[in-house]
Image: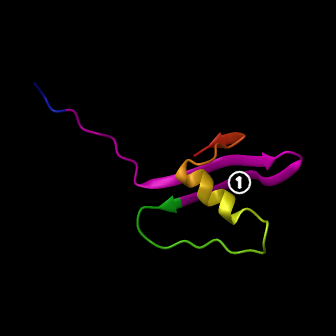
Amino acid sequence: MAKQKLNIVNRINFYQVSKSYGDETILTEFNVEIPEKGLISFTGVSGKGKTTLLRLLAGLELPDSGTI
C-alpha cells in the first residue's frame, strides 16, 4: 500500500473575519497571515479586539463570518 503524503499548512490565515458581541462590532473583515516561523504582535488600546483574536485562534470563539 502506497503512503499518502499529508498536505500540511505552515501558516495561519484570518480571511475576512468578523466578530460581534450583541450590537458591539469587534472585528470587521479582518485579514492577516501568520507565518510558521517568526514573531507577530498585536497592540492597541483596551477593547479593540486583541483578546478576541486570541480566543478565535484558540477555538474558544467562532467568527460571525470569514475563515481561520
Where does the magenta region start and end? Answer: 4-33
Is residue 18 inside the magenta stretch?
A: yes
Query: For residue 2, what is the image quadrant?
Result: top left
Residue drawn at the location 79% of the way across and 66% of the way down: 47
35 displayed left or right of 48 = left
Give the colouring mode of the picture. Answer: rainbow
On screen, residue 31 above or below 50 = above
Residue at the extreme top of the image, as rendered: 1
Quadrant of the image occupied by residue 32: bottom right
Quadrant location of residue 55? bottom right
Q: x, y percentage for residue 39?
A: 49, 73
Q: Within 10 Å of the Cα at label 1, are there few (<14), some (14-19), or many (20+) other Cα atoms?
A: some
Q: Which residue is drawn at 52% across and 61% down?
A: 34
Query: Residue 8 in the image: x percent, y percent?
Result: 35, 46
SS type, badge 1: strand
In this picture, residue 1 sits left or right of residue 33: left
- Foreground of the two, 8 or 64: 64
Horizontal and vertical percent position of residue 24? 86, 52
The mark tally for this picture is 1
Q: Residue type at mark 1?
A: Phe
What is the residue that sits farthest to the right in this orientation?
23
Q: In this view, does 59 lie to the left or right of 62?
A: left
Residue 37 position (above or below residue 5): below
Left or right: 6 as drawn, with respect to 18? left
Residue carrying label 1: 30
Which residue is rendered at x = 89% and y = 47% of the image? 23
Q: In which quarter of the image is the N terminus?
A: top left
Residue at 85 percent of width and 45 percent of height: 22
Provide the major secondary structure of the magenta segment. Answer: strand
In this rendering, the answer to whether 52 lies above or below 29 is below
Percent coordinates x, y for residue 25 in the rendering: 83, 52
